[in-house]
Image: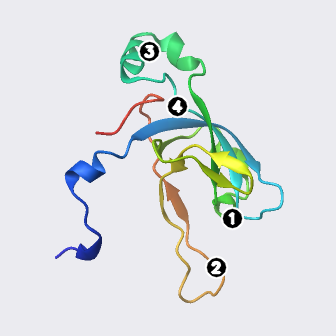
């Protein structure tokens, strides 16, 4: 039996979500917030044909492509934010742009975990990012 049948969506609804691999170029704290990090993320070539072309040309993959700003509440899970730099992770990239503390967030990093620990009030379990070795800009399907 499924966990929560109330929140099911059709496969056609799910297909609307664009999930792409992005490489985190920088991670900086957001002034005035203890929770937020401002990530600068390279999503590689801006289109699927460009990704295929770049895969054939390794030098093109090394350069910067479509750079976006992502604002995420993951700071407490990464006290050493430099550990995020260079990671290739999954992002939802076709969400509406959202302003968070005056900053535009142009995608959302995907993660699991980070739930409150039942025996330790105020403490949280680890947060796991969906890291991968796929080329920057690759789209999940």
Visible in this render: residue 60? Answer: yes
Locate the N terminus by quadrant: bottom left
* Residue at x 73%, y 59% (from the top left corner): 79
Discs 2/3, front: 3
* Residue named by callout 4: 43
Classify mark 4: helix, strand or loop: loop
Label located before the other in sequence (2 or 1): 1
Distance CA(mark 4)–CA(mark 3): 12 Å
Mark 3, residue position: 54
Give the structural element (helix, strand or loop) at label 3.
Answer: helix
Of pointers 1 and 3, the one earlier in the residue sequence: 3
Determine whether label 4 and label 3 are within 8 Å by CB: no
- State the separation of the CA atoms marked 4 and 2: 33 Å
Residue 3 in sight in this render: no
Left or right, residue 121 beside residue 133: right
27 displayed left or right of 86: right
Residue drawn where x is 54% and y is 45% of the image: 107
Question: Secondary structure under badge 1?
Answer: helix
Q: Which mark is first along the chain, 3 or 2?
A: 3
Reply above or below: 97 against 127.
Answer: above
Q: Which disc is residue 123 wearing? A: 2
Answer above or below: position of 64 versus 133: above
Kindly identify which residue carries mark 1.
Answer: 76
Q: Is mark 1 in CB contact (under 8 Å) with mark 4?
A: no
Q: Is residue 36 above or below residue 68?
A: below
Q: Are marks 4 and 2 in contact (CB under 8 Å)?
A: no
- Say which residue appears at 53% left-offset and 11% top-offset: 59
Q: Nearer the viewer, mark 1 or mark 4?
A: 4
* Disc 2 to disc 1: CB gap under 8 Å: no
């Amino acid at each position: 039996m499924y966990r929560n049948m109330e929140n099911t969506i059709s496969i056609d609804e799910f297909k609307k979500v664009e999930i792409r691999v992005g490489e985190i170029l920088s991670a900086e704290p957001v002034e005035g917030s203890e929770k937020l990090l401002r990530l600068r993320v390279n999503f590689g070539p801006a289109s699927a044909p460009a990704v295929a072309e770049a895969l054939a040309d390794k030098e093109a993959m090394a350069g910067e492509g479509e750079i976006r700003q992502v604002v995420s509440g993951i700071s407490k899970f990464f006290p050493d934010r430099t550990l995020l730099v260079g990671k290739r992770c999954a992002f939802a990239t076709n969400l509406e742009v959202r302003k968070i503390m005056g900053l535009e967030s142009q995608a959302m990093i995907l993660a699991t975990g980070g739930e409150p620990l039942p025996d330790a009030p105020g403490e949280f379990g680890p947060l796991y990012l969906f890291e991968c070795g796929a080329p920057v800009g690759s789209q999940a399907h």
